[in-house]
Image (spheres, rainbow, N blue to C red):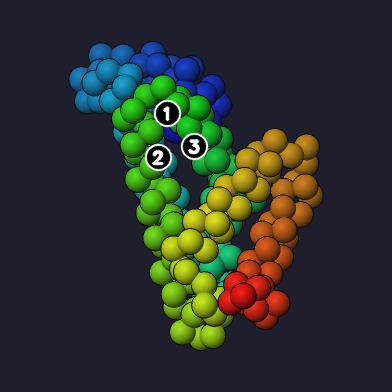
């Protein structure tokens, strides 16, 4: 299902195309999944679960500031797998504008991502980073920044542009932690 959405978009992901991709009949898909709406919700949940597993893997292998950057980059199209995930999410985001169930699923995912990033920021604050900043507000800003850079990366003409955007993310995170930024926040 996710391959079909990454390739053809949400509109192109119907029971027939998913059945063809899976090598089975539309009756089998309909029996086990239901209608297109149920198929899309299941696919979105699978995509979210896939990204969450990727973030958990990254978090387990990294620590400190590298962990924060890696969790933010997990939602950016920095390799073919993450690029496909981004395309899937943006297809769903477009559909979610008119579908309350999809919109609710996406809202839950972004809430989860912000909480995860906020938890890492709180851990970093214990180490002296991001002094005097509200972890929730900073997480919201950082996730928004990562998401905006990811959208640009999806439409980048080549991989070097996407890699540059990853550098922009790291630069921005460093600026949020800079002493000058801390002084401005205290004023």
Element carrying mark 2: helix
Q: Residues within 10 Å of mark 1 (few under 14, many from 20)?
A: some
- SS for dot 3: helix
Q: Residue at x 55, y 26 (%)?
A: 7
Could you say which quadrant of the image residue 183 lies in?
Answer: bottom right
Taking the view exactly as shown, the residue that stands out farthest to the left is 31
Tell me the quadrant of the picture where the C terminus can be found: bottom right
From the viewer's perspective, is 49 left or right of 172? left
Residue 43 coordinates in the image, percent (x, y): 37, 33
Q: How far apart are marks 3 and 1 (CA)?
A: 10 Å
Residue 89 placed where, x, y %? 49, 37
Q: Nearer the viewer, residue 35 or 4?
A: 35
Quadrant of the image for the N terminus?
top left
Q: Which of 85 and 185 is in front in this view?
A: 185
Inter-mark Cα distance, 3 to 2 = 8 Å
Q: Do the residues labelled 3 and 1 touch (CB within 8 Å)?
A: no
Q: Mark 1 points at which residue?
A: 96
What's the mark number on residue 89? Answer: 3
Of circles 3 and 2, the one toward us is 2
Residue 80, percent from left and from top: 61, 44
* Residue 112 visible in the displayed image: yes
């Amino acid at each position: 299902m996710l391959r079909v959405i990454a390739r053809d978009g949400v509109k192109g992901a119907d029971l027939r195309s998913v059945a063809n991709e899976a090598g089975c009949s539309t009756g089998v898909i309909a029996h086990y999944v239901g209608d297109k709406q149920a198929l899309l919700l299941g696919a979105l949940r699978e995509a979210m679960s896939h990204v969450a597993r990727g973030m958990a893997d990254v978090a387990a292998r990294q620590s400190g500031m590298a962990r924060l950057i890696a969790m933010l980059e997990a939602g950016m199209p920095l390799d073919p797998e993450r690029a496909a995930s981004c395309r899937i999410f943006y297809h769903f985001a477009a559909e979610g504008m008119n579908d309350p169930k999809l919109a609710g699923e996406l809202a839950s995912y972004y809430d989860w991502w912000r909480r995860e990033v906020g938890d890492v920021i709180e851990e970093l604050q214990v180490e002296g980073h991001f002094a005097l900043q509200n972890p929730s507000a900073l997480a919201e800003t950082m996730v928004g920044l990562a998401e905006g850079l990811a959208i640009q990366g999806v439409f980048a003409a080549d991989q070097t542009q996407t890699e540059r955007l990853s550098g922009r993310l790291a630069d921005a995170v460093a600026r949020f932690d800079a002493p000058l930024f801390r002084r401005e926040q205290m004023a």
